[in-house]
Image (cartoon, rainbow, N blue to C red):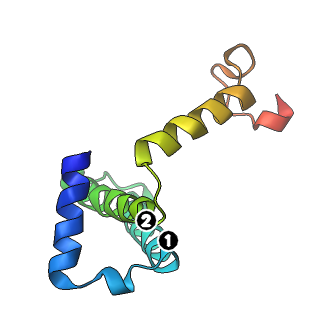
Amino acid sequence: MADVLGELRVFVAEREWGQFHTPENLAKSVSIEAAELLECFQWGKPADADAVRAELADVLTYCLLLADRIGADPLAIVAEKLEVTRAKYPVELSRGRSTKHDQL
């Protein structure tokens, strides 16, 4: 993870794009790229695996850049959120169900 984040930092610095990478702009970019990922599955057509990987890479790239910009460790915030979600969705109540936590 550190290697990829380091490469992203260099890539952005070489192009002087950091000036555009406000948290708001990066969050917008995550949403835009997520929509492009969803487009791969539009109309129920079989998804092109290469296109899915490319769009997913774009989503992850912007997520990593946003985490870096706000000073958050991506793996740490995922682990923290997982603990919260575990508490909201105990295995014994949620296994095999898609019910929202407040209706379990």
Say which label, 2 or 1, has the lower sequence index: 1
The kind of secondary structure element at disc 1 is helix
Report which residue position mark 2 lands on.
66
User: What x and y, as percent, mark residue 81?
Assistant: 59, 40
Residue at 75 percent across and 38 percent down: it is 100
Looking at the rendering, which quadrant does residue 29 occupy? bottom left
Residue at 25 percent across and 47 percent down: it is 2
- The answer to the question of whether label 2 and label 1 lie on touching residues, with beta carbons closer than 8 A, is yes
Residue furthest front in the image: 71
Q: Nearer the viewer, residue 47 or 57?
A: 57
User: What x and y, as percent, mark residue 3?
Assistant: 18, 49
State how many labels appear: 2
Residue at 32 percent across and 56 percent down: it is 56
Mark 2 vs mark 1, CA separation in Å: 7 Å
Q: Mark number for residue 95?
A: none
Q: Is residue 81 above or below residue 53?
A: above
Q: Is residue 23 above or below residue 104?
A: below
Tag nearer the camera, 2 or 1: 2
| Kind of residue indicated by mark 1 | Ala
User: What x and y, as percent, mark residue 33?
Assistant: 39, 69
Looking at the rendering, which quadrant does residue 91 occupy? top right
| Kind of residue indicated by mark 2 | Leu
The kind of secondary structure element at disc 2 is helix
Report which residue position mark 1 lands on.
27
Would residue 98 appear left or right of 33 to someone viewing this image?
A: right
Disc 1: CA contacts within 10 A as few (<14), some (14-19) or many (>=20): some
Would residue 82 appear left or right of 85 to someone viewing this image?
A: left
Q: Is residue 17 above or below residue 71?
A: below
Looking at the rendering, which quadrant does residue 60 occupy? bottom left
Q: Is residue 53 above or below residue 96?
A: below
**Quadrant containing the C terminus in the rendered view:** top right
